[in-house]
Amino acid sequence: MMVNTGFLQFIAILCLLMQGIVQCNGGLNSQFIASEAEALLEFKEGLKDPSNVLSSWKHGNDCCHWKGVGCNTTTGHVISLDLYCSNSLDKLQGHVSSALLQLPYLSYLNLTGNDFMQSRVPDFLGNMQNLKHLDLSHANFKGNLSDNLVNLSLLESLDLSGNAFYVNNLKWLQGLSSMKILDLSGVDLSSCENDWFHDIRAILHSLETLRLSGCQLHKLPTSPPPEVNFDSLVTLDLSINYFNSTPDWLFEKCHHLQNLNLSLNNLQGLIPYSIVRLTTLEILDLSKNSLIGSIPNFFDWLVNLVALDLSYNMLSGSIPSTLGQDHGLNNLKELHLSINQLNGSLERSIHQLSSLVVLNLAVNNMEGIISDVHLANFSNLKVLDLSFNDVTLNMSKNWIPPFQLENIGLAKCHLGPQFPKWIQTQKNFSHIDISNAGVFDIVPNWFWDLLPSVEHMNLSYNGLRSCGHDFSQKFKLKTLDLSNNNFSCALPRLPPNSRHLDLSNNLFYGTISHVCEILCFNNSLETLDLSFNNLSGVIPNCWTNGTNMIILNLAKNNFTESIPDSFGNLINLHMLIMYNNNLSGGIPETLKNCQVMTLLDLQSNRLRGPIPYWIGTDMQILEALILGRNSFDENIPTNLCLLKSLHILDLSDNQLTGPIPRCVFPAMATEESVNEKSYMEFLTIEESLSIYLSRSKHPLLISWKGADRSFHRGGRMFGYIKIIDLSSNFLKEGIPAEIGKLVELVGLNLSSNQLVGSIPSNIGEMESLEWLDLSSNQLSCAIPTSMVNLCSLGVLNLSYNTLSGNIPIGIQMETFDESSFQGNPHLCGSPLTKACLEDGNSWFKDKHCSDIEGSIEHESDDNHEDKVLGMEINPLYISMAMGFSTGFWVFWGSLILIASWRHAYFRFLSNLNDKIYVTVVVTLNKLQRKLHTQQPPM
């Protein structure tokens, strides 16, 4: 018993000693371990930690319990540092301190998702030779990847993806002999286009995963050296490059490949037959290429295939009868065929896909009537997307599906007219899109009760009715689209964490005070569209917390009073659309803070005062300024000429006075190049902007060719329209000649003003012009003959001016009728009934125009150019200059070149100087004596 007790005491003491080793502030290795804790604290000092992620890193605490720190349970040494960040709010920011060198046993380092402020990868990492796993992905590093990592021979995993790296060569990879996982996605390899494969092949013998997505690669080797060994390769990702074909060896030599991603390249032609050699393949992604032809039958030979993605191609034909059959692809769980040109009857082929978990056939030309019988065996289905096909779902009234869907995509399928009751059985879905599905019904209460787990909901473009639902407890709902329905009630309380809200084109009424609730709860809202409703009252001044707002559309309502000053807090706002309301007052100066605005549409309100000058200086990337049908007054500010990206300028139907500014808008004068600032701002909000533009149903209303016409902000036509409309104001003086430099302008309306003078002679240079209205002014003189060059002109109105002379003859001019020229009593020629004189001239001569017209007709091109540039020179002055130059160099050149002449000339000047001096002195003495003799004696 004594022995056992002593033994137990020995064991207890040993355990206490081992526990002390693990503590950083005590134990057998206390001094050494303490140095590692100090190194970690020094590393922390180089970082900003706004969210206190590293709050546990404190002196005196056990460093092995610090967040992200891992220790060897036997020795207590720090062996891993995992500071992975998945939340942008928790990012660490700063630099990587060399204090990490004091962690000699560190084998795992993960800094993913933090912000190292575009610094370079520190050179000292190459000295941490015990590293086995290094992950610097998506951490805002940049610069050239040098060969400082070549010494990390134990490294098994290296992830440098998602940064701004570039390399001149990859020879440093040859030292990484233990490499199993290599991810260089996003690294610019264009400088080593011809050598990258040669350098990587040195580690292929051990490599299991190779990711080179988005590396700007253009081609694969036609045939690799025979000694290259691909036997270890399991995952190969070459997506987002520029490959237009794949060599057969890629499929022949990768004997154990399980995951192949070639998406987002430029692959063309048919799907290559050699894929069948990849018998171990489990995941194949060929999406977002330019593949054509039908889906081949040989996919059923790939018996291990689990996921197949052929979406975003140009594939045609029907789904092969063997796809998904038990004797073939019995392991297939995911099938993505969306956005192709597939056709045929879905009801004939869908039964063979019953083992699928994911079925995505959206945006094709499939047709058929699907009943509950066709889906009876789909017990594993979680994602079903048949959107934008001509498919009817004809389910029995009490059908209970065998599946529980997570994603329901049935947009533009035929589901109605009753609301589909089978959705009530689905308890797990997070995404539902049944837009434009022909449902004309009251939304049942049970549907709203299903929403606690829903993140994205689109019920738009139906005839749905329902009222009074409260979304304020739907905390997961990020996207809510109820637009284009018949909801008629006060605006409901809104989901507090939403990013995209579209309730437009309904019959909602009342105030929008509930918007303030979500702005105060969470600053997540990016797009808000409440347009085309019956909302009214004052727009509340509660937008202080809307700094993430990108698009705000309140058009076509009954809002009154002024635009809130707090709109100035919407510093990321790109589009502000509030046309057709009853807003009054001026444009608040706080809007100058919205410096990334691209569209400002306030037309058809009761706004007044001068147009702010700061629009031209503080909204420099503005593309459309639409302020028509208001009561703005005073002059048009010349600062608007600074808007380099302006496509649309509509200031019509106001009370503006003064001259038209002599602006040459670059976007209207040349084919527009990308505005760098605008492009960089676009990248920051690209996802949100594209979501809104793809769903936007309420386009800009622009006066086009005399009538209001709709243009979608994201559509192809919007980039095409470049117009200026200054009609129905009190503008005076003449049309500036600079207007002729706007050669990309498509529409110009200056009608109903008080403009005088002649039409600029260079108007014929505006070859893109389709619509020109200069009517109801006081323009005089002849119509410029250059107008016959306007071959695209489809609408012309020069009526009710005082133009004179003959109407120019040309093919395009002959397409216009008398109404285009009426109200000009001194015009003659076709299409007017008044004929010109036999010599083709008008019987009327405007004495103010004859000299001008003569100079225009008879002046040569050279003289005209000189006059425009102010460089016409009188020949007399040219002769004088030539004579002076010749005389100057004959005289002085002779003196310089002939020494005897030079000496004689200067002796002459010296003698002449002496003679003049003596003469002056003698004359002065004589004059003094004469004056002295004439004085009387004292």
Image (cartoon, rainbow, N blue to C red):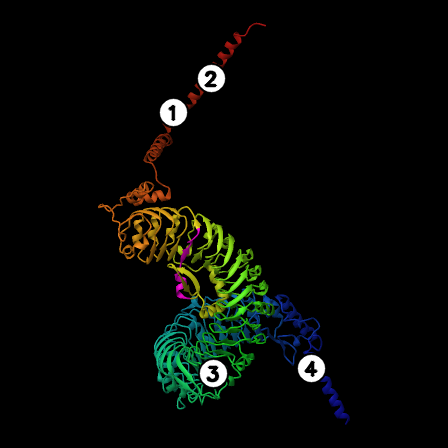
Q: Name the amino acid, label 3.
A: Pro
Image quarter of the N terminus: bottom right
Judging by the rendered image, the residue that carries numbered circle 4 is: 18
The secondary element bearing badge 3 is classed as loop
Range covered by the magenta-colored residues: 715-729
Q: Name the amino acid, label 1.
A: Ala
132 in relation to 545, above or below = below
Residue 236 location, x and y as percent?
45, 77
Q: State which tag comes first along the sequence, 4 or 3.
A: 4
Residue 929 location, x and y as percent?
51, 10
View extreme (bottom): residue: 1
Judging by the rendered image, the residue that carries numbered circle 3 is: 420
Judging by the rendered image, the residue that carries numbered circle 2 is: 920
Which numbered marker is on residue 904?
1
Q: State which tag comes first along the sequence, 2 or 1.
A: 1
Q: State which tag comes first along the sequence, 4 or 1.
A: 4
Q: State which tag comes first along the sequence, 2 or 4.
A: 4
For the residues labelled 4 and 1, the Cα–Cα distance comes to 113 Å
